[in-house]
Image (tube, rainbow, N blue to C red):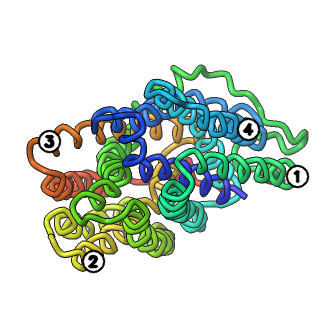
Amino acid sequence: MLWLVCFLNYSDRQAIFALFPLLRVQFHLSNVQLALIGSSFMWAYAIFGPVAGWLGDRLSRKWLILAGLIFWLFVTTTTILAHQFWQLAVLRSLNGIAEAIYFPAAMSLISSYHDATTRSRAMSLHQSAVYAGTIAGGVVASWLGEHFGWRSNFICFGALGFLLCIILILFLQEPVSDLSPNHDTSTGKTKVPNPSLSKITKEILGAPPVLRLIIAFIGANFVAMIFMVWLPTFLYGKFHMSLAMAGMNATIYLQIASVFGVLTGGVLADSLVTRDGGGRMRTQAFGLLVGMPFLFLAGRTSSFGWLIFGMIGFGFAKGIYESNIWASLHDVVNPQQRATAVGVMNSLGWLGGGFAPIAFAFGAQHFGMGDCLSSTSLIYGCVAGLLLWNAKWHGRDRRFDPD
């Protein structure tokens, strides 16, 4: 059920980027204005993230997830009424708040069902919804936009969201035996810890292993946002594809490869972590190092065949890294603070990633889109080095391991 929520969220995120060529014409927008539409979502998502995480450690995660989904449904369907640039930007910001509510509570819920021996695999399966949703958003949105106009996408998403709300109300449950100390199994209610959001955030950011993971996430997310936002437009312009073909080719190869990568990374990390406390982080670093040459190739080649090869390799490597983003974090934070830690890390990662589309837009004006895409391989190299350092020196604190 959580997979379906994540799938729908990412379908909606990717859809707007696939529709950029249509929005540019209808609203007379520049590249920077288009980037701001994407960034407005990311910044709102980032700003509200810590609050969403704090709530996830205190309230029923089921009903928090449902509240976010209902708010998302309202904002998504309202998007069909937008007729000006500022309206689109505001609605995407509200959409970011709605989706921010979901992720910390969902990650905490998964961790409560899975201990350290299966957590990477469980979270990697959930992460596969990101790639499936991105494919669906890019392909379906492009096709619907080309044939029925850009507003038709949000009518479709609204209908699916309504059905999903009913499913979650009927079937989503908190675990019977919650691994988190915040859950009172005798009453079935979540206990409310005393510390404030600011105190918990300070404690989370004061832990060097957590801080290094956050910095790594910001760097990797910066690269991911560039490809998510601008790859359809890059293919549309450089290879003269139709809108539908650009949307499909920008997502399908990269994201399908990511599904295989994320499942591989989950299995590999669960195996390594039994022998090496930093095994999840080493798995992440391995994925980034593998991805570097493919990133460089994707931006530099003028052959569509080699571009596909580059996107497949990058997607597989990206999946290996992303399979352990949250499992690595949960290895080094107190179970009482899992949702808050996810909210803080997600917030800072998306806040940094929110600048990526704008920075890329300015860079592309001077150096071209291809060279700017290739340069992101340097970011991957730096992030891999940071993760290897973290894996070597932090050591997993076994106080946070579930029994």
Q: Which residue is mark 3?
A: 365
Q: Which mark is residue 178?
A: none
Badge 4: residue crowd in 10 Å (few <14, some 14–19, many ≥20): some
Q: Quadrant of residue 99?
A: top right
Per the rendering, the mark at residue 70 is 4
- Position of the N terminus, as image quadrant, is bottom right
Which numbered disc, 3 or 2, marks the residue that appears first in the sequence?
2
Q: What percent of the width, then of the height, locates residue 189?
A: 84, 37
Q: Residues within 10 Å of mark 3 (few under 14, many from 20)?
A: few
Q: Decide which of tag 4 and tag 1 comes sooner along the chain.
A: 4
Residue at figure coordinates x 42%, y 39% from the top left: 26
User: Residue under circle 2?
Assistant: 309
Task: Specify which label sits upstream in the sequence, 4 or 3.
Answer: 4
| Residue that appears at 9% across and 47% down | 367
Q: Amino acid at mark 1?
A: Leu
Q: Amino acid at mark 3?
A: Gln
Is 257 above or below relative to 191? below
Disc 2 and disc 4 in contact, CB within 8 angstroms: no
Left or right? Give the position of 14 relative to 358: right
Can you see residue 321? Answer: no
The residue shown at (45%, 39%) is 345
Q: CA distance from mark 1 to mark 3?
A: 51 Å
Image coordinates for residue 44, horizontal then vertical, percent: 48, 29
Q: x, y (%) of residue 287?
A: 32, 67
Q: Secondary structure at mark 2?
A: helix
Q: Residues within 10 Å of mark 1 (few under 14, many from 20)?
A: few
- SS at circle 4: helix
